Image: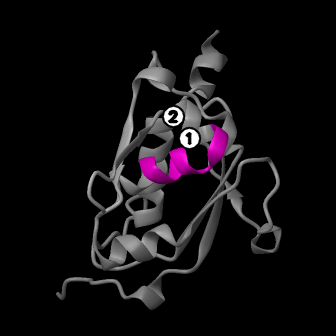
């Protein structure tokens, strides 16, 4: 008996739609990164791109817990002398509403060629509208805050 090793042709292209409204940023990013890498599939293989696309809408309505809106700081360097820059999530979401989710998902994806290719399959939009209706995306429920609402 031979060991099954999936090929990229074995995966069909699937599109998922995620509503980020009232979702906690870290939990949302972890679940989206898992789907983008294909870890939700029984034929997961770390060296193959599973051809899954994720569309995130309402990115500007994502939640952060505690005082992270003002106390969390994002740093980056411009590669110039004295080029250390920083910002808070509050300022970042005003300038680029999709950047918070993109940074959070990128932090959970491997930093290699496959990881860069994976991030191209992530589409993030600030509002409820997206131009990918022709792909007929499936709604992906994350069960983060929805479970709490059902109990109450």
Q: Are marks 2 and 1 in contact (CB under 8 Å)?
A: yes
Label 1 SS:
helix
What secondary structure prevails in the magenta region? helix
Q: Is 143 situated above or below 138?
A: above
* Residue 47 picture quarter: bottom left
Return the mark for residue 103.
Answer: none
Residue at 38% x, 65% y: name it.
42
Q: Quadrant of the N terminus?
A: bottom left
The residue carrying pointer 2 sits among few (fewer than 14), some (14 to 19) or many (20 or more) residues within 10 Å by Cα, namely: many
Query: Over which residues does the magenta segment extend?
Result: 94-104
The answer to if 86 sits in the magenta stretch is no
Q: Please report the residue visible at 78 percent of the width from the left and 60 percent of the height from the top.
A: 130
Position of 2 with respect to 29 (left or right) is left
- Residue 121: % across, % down: 54, 71
Q: Residue at x 41, y 45 (%)?
A: 30
The percent coordinates of residue 139 (x first, y second) are 69, 52
Using the image, tell me which numbered label, if any, was put on residue 89: 2
Q: Is residue 110 above or below residue 143?
A: below
Distance from the alpha carbon under mark 2 to that under mark 1: 5 Å
Residue identifier under label 1: 92
Viewer-side residue, 82 vs 91: 82
- Residue 143 visible within the image: no
């Amino acid at each position: 008996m031979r060991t099954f090793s999936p090929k990229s042709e074995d995966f069909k292209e699937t599109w998922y739609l995620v509503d980020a409204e009232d979702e906690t940023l870290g939990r949302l990013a972890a679940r989206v990164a898992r789907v983008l890498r294909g870890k939700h599939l029984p034929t997961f293989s770390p060296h193959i791109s599973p051809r899954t696309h994720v569309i995130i809408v309402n990115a500007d309505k994502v939640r952060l817990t505690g005082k992270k809106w003002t106390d969390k700081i994002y740093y980056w360097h411009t590669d110039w002398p004295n080029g250390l820059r920083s910002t808070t999530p509050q300022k970042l979401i005003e300038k680029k509403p999709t950047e918070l989710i993109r940074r959070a998902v990128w932090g959970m994806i491997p930093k290699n060629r496959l990881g860069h290719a994976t991030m191209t399959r992530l589409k993030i939009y600030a509002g409820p509208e997206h131009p990918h209706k022709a792909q007929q995306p499936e709604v992906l429920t994350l069960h983060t805050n929805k479970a709490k609402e059902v109990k109450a």
